[in-house]
Image (cartoon, rainbow, N blue to C red):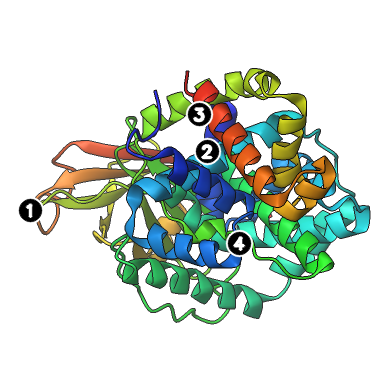
């Protein structure tokens, strides 16, 4: 039941020392270089992170921090809209770095951030397949009507399309458009539809290229998520 | 399992800048992470600052959680421990710590990895117990107190190279025990 039977005891020991921060500088540099090209070594580093974290989780007693820590955090992170705009660009820089490293394929959308649109979302939903094969996170800003849908797992099948639907109560599903195969899709939700989000459901269906020809879902429902309202 | 699913869900929402999810994650995990900062830094004021910085990292880096293949608690604890160790070593002057977020897993073999993690979680106390007491103390010292080989060699009064051989052997024994 070992994680990766291919790892030598010497490399496993080095991976552990790397995680512990025990390697002499030169060996740590060498290790970083090897990690870039050796998946089995990366897996072993992660396995040691997991083993040590498991030890800490079980052995270190929780201590409730003073309320001032949360208050300072909220002030620091959320009070300043300009700052959160900057954090969004930081997020995309991180995604771009990963893409360049060839580790995940992401298309970076240039985020332009309309005025006053950077408040926290009013509605969110996790749209997920039951077997975990597809998961998307969606967030709607009520004022701007901007719905961000971020792909967290799963992809669009070759030669097919994924269409996003808003299902409010017993009404027929309303198409919100096709999902990009890339990391994020942005949808401009028309004002009359925004009012339907509370308590509704978002769903993704499998459709032919270009989307449903009928205006109603025609293929399998791939994923579904209940919309939740964020309390201010 | 449901606690883990809840944390997964919160992290997914934090990627979308969901502040309510962030505050829920703070309330669910801050005591554990504060305990770890306190254990590493052994100074309340410094641990409070470290905890704040740890949660800023979590807010800013939640998008990288998925690619590690870690459980939420493993990811959160790794960030907290490494940040606290960085602070500790900055205080002592010098030293560099492995930056875990530079490491990216290959797409995780989900259920298999989870089964391994669950098995290890059940066995970790027993396996540490099987190690000679001073060797288990050295493992804890390196992970939770940021002790270097020089610190450990001084504490156990052995030459540095002996200390290294000794700790590496203990770690491999621990790994073997965990995978039994």
Name the one closer to the observer, B34 or A200: B34
How crowded is the residue under tag 1: few (<14 C-alpha within 10 Å), some, or many (20+)? few
User: Mark 4 or mark 3: which is in front?
Assistant: 4
Q: Mark 2 points at which residue?
A: B71
Where residue A87 appears, as percent x and y from the top left, is 57, 72
Q: Is residue A230 among what the camera can see? A: no
Where residue B168 appears, as percent x and y from the top left, is 58, 40
Left or right, B87 with reference to A107 = right
Q: Is residue A10 among what the camera can see? A: yes
C-alpha separation, residue under disc 4 versus residue under disc 1: 51 Å
Q: Name the residue under label 3.
A: B117
How crowded is the residue under tag 4: few (<14 C-alpha within 10 Å), some, or many (20+)? some
Q: Are marks 4 and 1 in contact (CB under 8 Å)?
A: no
User: Mark 4 or mark 2: which is in front?
Assistant: 4
Q: Mark 3 lies on which chain?
A: B
C-alpha separation, residue under disc 4 versus residue under disc 2: 29 Å
What number is the disc on residue A24?
Answer: 4
Q: Name the residue under label 1.
A: A159
Q: Quadrant of the N terminus of chain B?
A: top right
User: Mark 1 or mark 2: which is in front?
Assistant: 2
Q: Which chain carries label 2?
A: B
Q: Do the residues indicated by labels 1 and 2 lie within the same chain of the protein?
A: no
Q: Which of marks 4 and 1 is nearer the N terminus?
A: 4
């Amino acid at each position: 039941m070992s994680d990766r039977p291919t790892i030598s005891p010497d490399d496993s020991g080095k991976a552990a020392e790397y995680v512990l921060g025990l390697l002499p500088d030169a060996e740590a540099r060498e290790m970083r270089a090897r990690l870039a090209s050796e998946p089995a070594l990366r897996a072993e580093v992660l396995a040691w992170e997991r083993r040590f974290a498991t030890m800490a989780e079980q052995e270190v007693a929780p201590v409730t921090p003073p309320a001032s820590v949360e208050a300072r955090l909220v002030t620091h992170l959320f009070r300043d809209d300009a700052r959160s705009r900057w954090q969004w660009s930081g997020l995309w820089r991180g995604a771009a770095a990963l893409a360049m490293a060839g580790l995940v394929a992401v298309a970076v959308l240039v985020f332009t951030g309309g005025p006053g649109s950077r408040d926290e979302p009013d509605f969110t939903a996790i749209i997920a397949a039951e077997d975990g094969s597809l998961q998307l996170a969606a967030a709607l800003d009520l004022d701007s009507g901007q719905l961000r849908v971020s792909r967290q797992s799963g992809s669009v099948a070759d030669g097919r399309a994924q269409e996003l639907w808003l299902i409010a109560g017993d009404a027929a599903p309303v198409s919100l458009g096709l999902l990009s195969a890339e990391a994020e899709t942005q949808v401009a939700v028309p004002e009359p539809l925004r009012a339907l989000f509370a308590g509704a459901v978002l769903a993704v269906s499998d459709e032919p290229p270009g989307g449903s020809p009928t205006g109603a879902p025609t293929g399998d429902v791939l994923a579904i998520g209940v919309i939740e309202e964020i309390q201010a | 399992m449901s606690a883990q699913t809840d944390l997964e869900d919160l992290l997914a929402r934090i990627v979308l800048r969901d502040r309510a999810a962030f505050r829920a994650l703070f309330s669910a995990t801050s005591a554990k992470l504060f305990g770890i900062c306190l254990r590493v830094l052994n100074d309340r004021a410094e641990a409070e600052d470290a905890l704040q910085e740890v949660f800023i990292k979590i807010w800013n880096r939640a998008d990288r959680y998925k690619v590690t293949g870690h459980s939420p608690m493993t990811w959160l604890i790794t960030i907290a421990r490494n940040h606290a160790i960085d602070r500790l070593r900055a205080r002592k002057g010098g030293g560099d710590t492995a930056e875990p977020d530079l490491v990216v897993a290959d797409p995780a073999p989900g259920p298999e990895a989870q089964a391994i993690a669950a098995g290890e979680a059940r066995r970790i106390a027993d396996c540490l117990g099987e190690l000679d007491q001073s060797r288990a103390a050295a493992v804890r010292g390196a992970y939770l107190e940021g002790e270097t080989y020089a610190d450990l060699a001084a504490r156990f009064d052995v030459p540095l190279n002996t200390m290294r051989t000794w700790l590496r052997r203990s770690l491999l024994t621990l790994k073997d025990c965990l995978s039994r």
